Image: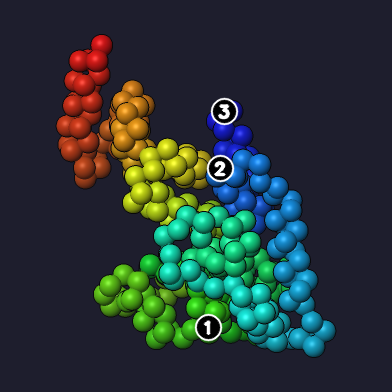
Amino acid sequence: MDSDPSLSQFAREVARPDRDIDLTRTALTIARSEYPALDIDLYVAKMAALAEGAMTAHATDPLGRLHRVREYLFEEQGFAGNADDYFDPHNSYLNDVLDRRLGIPITLSLVLIEVGRRVGLQMEGIGLPGHFVTGARVNGEHVLLDPFNGGTILTGETCGDLVARAVGRPIELTVEQFVPVTKRQFLTRMLANLKGIYWRQESWQKVVTVIDRLLVLAPDAGGEWRDRGIAWAGMGELRRTLSDWERYLTDFPNATDHEKVKTQLRRVRQKLAQLN
């Protein structure tokens, strides 16, 4: 970890109790893996400036403040979902989202949540299947918003429509799926999205970088040890593949793909023996 300062910084940020994790700062440490010279304090200040811009003396009640934040971010500041290039990795880095005003549901939710909290609103992330939305507790009501679509107010029915489009089939949403995510869960989903983008591109070094952070959040996530081994193999780092897959097979003997990975591991050992 010492060879990757941004990973060490990320580990320090998420070592706090969940309630004390600073989502803005921690998301920016994720971005530092891509932008090593990133000035985190500058972008924390940009988030604070957005909150200051959204404040108004006319919106004193929570519902008025929420509508003001929506209007300010999505109409005046132009934050929007990048539907034209959804899988652009820039959509997943908070500094890029703040600079370009473009993002995906989870990063736009992060902006809405963090600006809302700064103006005194009770904001939360809601990880629906295939689509992340934002919740706000206002006057005893749970208001749902879709930051990817201009902060649109959602109903249970429109949430179902969003999810059906995202996953390609109807899904009956349950009460449990509207439970707010923890900050660690929020960060895990951000990283999982980024991992998926780089996996599609076969950008294996970047996949490894993302998985390193996922393993900081959840060292017992067996699939990440397996997948990092695949990424190492894609880079030709067979000894590292061997190490991760051996750990996966040892620590997760009941995994459904145990025999498949075991067979692949045997081939890697044979290849290494031939190289020696």
User: Considering only vertical position in the picture, is 89 above or below 160?
Assistant: above
| 3D distance between C-alphas at marks 1 and 2 | 32 Å
Q: Amino acid at mark 1?
A: Thr
Residue at 56%, 42% in the rendered image: 33
Instruction: Judge by depth and name the residue closer to the eye, 263 or 87.
Output: 87
The residue labelled by disc 2 is 33
Residue closest to the far top: 276
Checking the image for residue 152, the label placed there is 1
**Dot 3 crowding, Cα within 10 Å, few <14, some 14–19, many 20+:** few
Residue at 30%, 32% in the rendered image: 233
Q: Amino acid at mark 3?
A: Ser
Q: Position of residue 71 (x, y in %)?
A: 65, 82
Instruction: Judge by depth and name the residue closer to the eye, 47 or 137.
Output: 47
**Dot 1 crowding, Cα within 10 Å, few <14, some 14–19, many 20+:** few
Residue at 74%, 53% in the rendered image: 42
Q: Amino acid at mark 2?
A: Ser
Residue at 47%, 40% in the rendered image: 209
Report the side of 255 relative to 83 (left or right): left
Mark toward the start of the polypeptide (2 vs 3) = 3
Q: Position of residue 83 (x, y in %)?
A: 44, 71
Instruction: Judge by depth and name the residue closer to the eye, 255 or 77.
Output: 77
Q: Quadrant of residue 22?
A: bottom right
| 3D distance between C-alphas at marks 2 and 3 | 12 Å
State which quarter of the image contains the C terminus. Answer: top left
Element at label 1: strand
The residue labelled by disc 3 is 3
User: Considering only vertical position in the picture, is 130 above or below 164?
Assistant: above
Mark toward the start of the polypeptide (3 vs 1) = 3
Element at label 3: loop
